[in-house]
Amino acid sequence: MFVERRFGFLPARFRSGPGRVLRSLAAGLGAIRSWPDLTASVVCTILLWTLNVTIFWVSFHSLGGELLSISWWGAAIASYLGGIGLALQLPGVGGGIQIAIIESLKRILGVAPETAVGGGILIWAVLTFPVVGLGLVLLPFQRVSFRRLEAMADGEAQGAGAGA
């Protein structure tokens, strides 16, 4: 692929990542086959981002204090940078989303560090708890138990250990 050839001077592990991302993007765009498909995709994307930013904005405002001064567009900045942070998983620290949101609140929106941490934790909880709760409710309907999940995780760990 062009990206992998263009960055041939980098080690394989660094140049294969962008190539995978671009191939995945191309495969996703392959689903858009007509103008109505493109229009529906754009409209759904705008609605989804509007809803996500509004959730950030309402969550920040629910804490009151300094976070009441954050505009909807400020919440959009935190949401966008949080989305970028999703790609970063930091060992021992957790997801990059919390760090990205906290840093955007502190460095870009001028919120005090303690308040920024509170906002980052609240957004993490608002985004995580409903998904985990729904997952727990749906487990029995998919005939999945915690024992089966543990067995699957053990199998993957053994497979990773054998491949190393």
Image: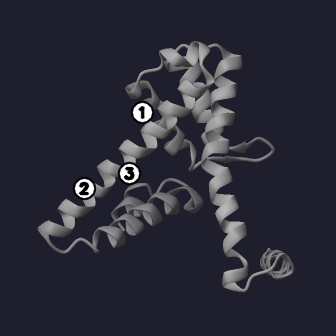
How far separated are the C-alphas under marks 1 and 2?
18 Å
Question: Percent x, y for residue 84?
Answer: 50, 43
Q: Which tag is nearer the camera, tag 1 or tag 3?
A: 3
Instruction: Bin the neighbour count of mark 2 within 10 Å (Cα to Cα): few under 14, some 14-19, many 20 and up.
Output: few
Mark closer to the chain start, 2 or 3:
2
Horizontal side of residue 58 vs 127, given as left or right = left
The three-letter code of the residue at mark 1 reads Ala
Up the image or down, 86 lies above or below 30; here it is: above
Question: Percent x, y for residue 7?
Answer: 43, 54
Q: Tell which residue pokes out farthest to the left in this image.
A: 35
Q: Residue at x 73, y 80 (%)?
A: 140
In this orientation, does residue 96 appear?
no
Up the image or down, 58 lies above or below 126; here it is: above
Residue beneath label 3, please?
48
Instruction: Bin the neighbour count of mark 3 within 10 Å (Cα to Cα): few under 14, some 14-19, many 20 and up.
Output: few
Horizontal side of residue 95 vs 38, given as left or right = right
Q: Are marks 1 and 3 in contact (CB under 8 Å)?
A: no
Q: Residue at x 51, y 63 (%)?
A: 16
